[in-house]
Amino acid sequence: MTELRVVDVTEEHLDSVWQVRIRSFGPGGDRDEWKKTALTFVADRRFLGVVDGDVLVAAARIWPFEQWWSGRRVPMGGVAGVVVAPEYRGRGVGSLLMRGVLQRCADKGYPLTGLYPATTVLYRHLGYEFAGSRYKFSFQAADLRTLGGSGTAVRKAGPADADRFLELASTAHETKRSSGPLIWPRSEIVSWLEDEDNFAYVADDGFVVYNWSDGDLVVDELIAGSEETARALWATVGSGASIAKTVHAYCAPFDPIHLLAEHEADGDARIVRWMLRLVDAPAALAARGFPEGAVLEAELRIDDPELPANTGDWHLSIADGSARLTPSEPSTDALRVGPRGLAALYAGTRLAALRGAGLVTGGDALDPALDTVFGGPTPYMLDYF
């Protein structure tokens, strides 16, 4: 290694990124489609790489997401496509790249960053921690076909319904105080609705998007604002039962379908975990939702070696469903926490677990109140990125 440095990936780098990608993930995908998408990241400076001299040896992209946290939308930089050339692994290149990604997320104004880890060692070292999961359940198609909802009007959806889909999803997640689901850029929603391999249907208060996969049906997302709409949309998917015996569905572990379907979901449900990190602690806490009526005044000591702006003594005040994190004086009663513990706390991990893992110390008297204000439904994602 002669001169390792983080750079913005340019169009001229993309052939090299593709080669490193092939060596990292194996062959697969359409190169032209990948490059078309990659150029959108290049144009917005959301594609970073590491070069050794003039040779690109690592790269990562940042998706411009919003993520629901207790029913409120929080901007989140979704880190994807992290690749390091095999001959450069184990030399600190991945850490160098991710430090650049963290700084770029800060520059772009993302209070949060999230990712699906190929390895936890690198990301935990940089302050990420598990926050939730993506769940894939399998149901009998014949069960879904008989759910009813025939009195609910359902029509085929298309690209012109993109705004309606975003509106329906927002209403549902705000009402349910969801934590974890993503809001994709509108252009991506339009692209999915244009894709002939996806089947999309919409009702007055819900929608479903699904597709075929190896003879089965896969539900990517189903939003329903009422029981009748849920029954109608699931029955629409189940109408393919004469050909597809199984419907795989990405949904929350507490989704109403678990109560509506006659038979329990297949026991080998797939769970993939994702990680979270706070980039701007005051902004992340201010944007997150909290239970109405919950009140908390607490002293925190945050130690964040990668993002020093988060480090310091802080006063956390929560009331009326919102939080404020303001600079404070040192306190012997403060809860001491690093970036991993802060991310897990933000995601609702109970204090007993955080203390058991050594991710927080001090401030023991705060535990019941912190569990109350940060608790809520299990965080989940529907999408992989």
Image (cartoon, grey):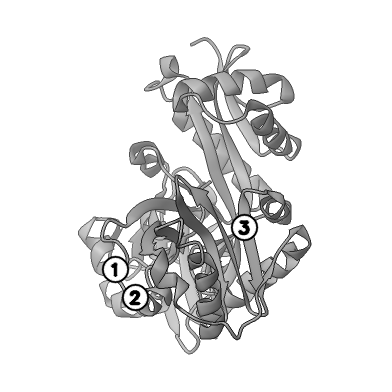
Please identify, in this view, whether the residue under mark 3 or under mark 2 is nearer the observer. Answer: 3
Q: Are marks 1 and 2 in contact (CB under 8 Å)?
A: yes
Residue 213 horizontal side relative to residue 357, left or right: right
Which residue position holds label 2?
371
Which residue position holds label 3?
199
Q: Position of residue 241 (x, y in %)?
A: 45, 63
Of 97 and 336, nearer the camera is: 97
Of 234 and 9, nearer the camera is: 234
Quadrant of the rendered image containing residue 118: top left
Q: Position of residue 213 (x, y in %)?
A: 48, 47
Which residue position holds label 1?
351
Q: Amino acid at mark 3?
A: Phe
Q: Residue at x 67, y 49 (%)?
A: 196
Q: CA distance from mark 3 to mark 1?
A: 43 Å
N-terminal of the pair, mark 3 or mark 1, is 3
Of 202 and 61, nearer the camera is: 202
Question: Dot 2, how many residues are within 10 Å of its Cα: few (below 14), some (14-19), or many (20+)?
Answer: some
State whether residue 371 appears in this view: yes
Q: CA distance from mark 3 to mark 2?
A: 41 Å
Question: Dot 1, how many residues are within 10 Å of its Cα: few (below 14), some (14-19), or many (20+)?
Answer: many
Q: Residue furthest right?
A: 160
- For the residue labelled by badge 2, is the local secondary structure a helix, a strand or a loop? helix
